[in-house]
Amino acid sequence: MSIDVNNESGTDIDEQAILDVARYALARMRIHPLSELSVIVVDAEAMEQLHIQWMDLPGPTDVMSFPMDELRPPAKDDEEPPQGLLGDIVLCPEVAEQQGTAAPTGHSMDEELQLLTVHGVLHLLGYDHEEPDEKAEMFGLQAAIVDGWRAEHGLTGPSPAPTVT
């Protein structure tokens, strides 16, 4: 799996954890091991510009996903996953820090960025949360992936509750 993490935000973040959780999520979703993903971390001003340009919404947001080859997880266990370019995930640590602090369980900016990375991966794979049933599926899968990654890395305590709406 080729995953690039490019921190352009000026904020100190745990880039290795973002790389690890993205790799874990893609493996769990059975994405071809030669597929490529880019994670870009930007400041609030750059994120706001992207949010306005692509969503026509004011203010910075937490995560945006820009799919390339529209890869999807294989439908069957014995099906070979396709190889390709997943696309880009853009994260904003300033918004992540605010959301982590405001979450009911309260968690760190880095924990929020890990959650948002998984959220972005799922969006690249075609998952959405516009409808209640889609939201239940996506957020359930997101929680299972984050919980599995945390357990594999010996992280204790409650997993971050989803803050993405």
Image (tube, helix red, strand yellow):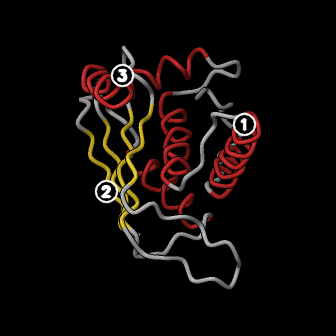
Q: Position of residue 141 (x, y in %)?
A: 70, 49
Q: Quadrant of the N terminus?
A: bottom left
Q: Secondary structure at mark 3?
A: loop
Q: Which residue is mark 1?
A: 157
Q: CA distance from mark 3 to mark 1?
A: 38 Å
Q: Which residue is mark 2?
A: 4
Mark 2 surroundings within 10 Å by alpha-carbon count, few (fewer than 14), some (14 through 19), many (20 or more): some
Q: Position of residue 44 (x, y in %)?
A: 31, 21
Answer whether labels 2 and 3 touch (C-beta < 8 Å): no
Tell me the kind of residue under disc 1: Gly
Residue at 32% across, 33% down:
12
Report which quarter residue 115 is drawn in.
Answer: top right
Residue at 41% across, 37% down:
64
Q: Position of residue 163 (x, y in %)?
A: 61, 26
Q: CA distance from mark 2 to mark 3?
A: 27 Å
Q: Earlier in the sequence, mark 1 or mark 2?
A: 2
Q: Which residue is mark 3?
A: 56
Q: Position of residue 156 (x, y in %)?
A: 70, 42
Q: Earlier in the sequence, mark 3 or mark 1?
A: 3
Tell me the kind of residue under disc 3: Asp
**Compared to 53, does 65 lie above or below?**
below
Q: Secondary structure at mark 1?
A: loop
Mark 3 surroundings within 10 Å by alpha-carbon count, few (fewer than 14), some (14 through 19), many (20 or more): few
- 42 or 69: nearer the viewer: 69
Residue at 56% across, 50% down:
122
User: Which dot, 1 or 2, sits closer to the camera?
Assistant: 2
Is 80 displayed left or right of 98 in the figure?
right
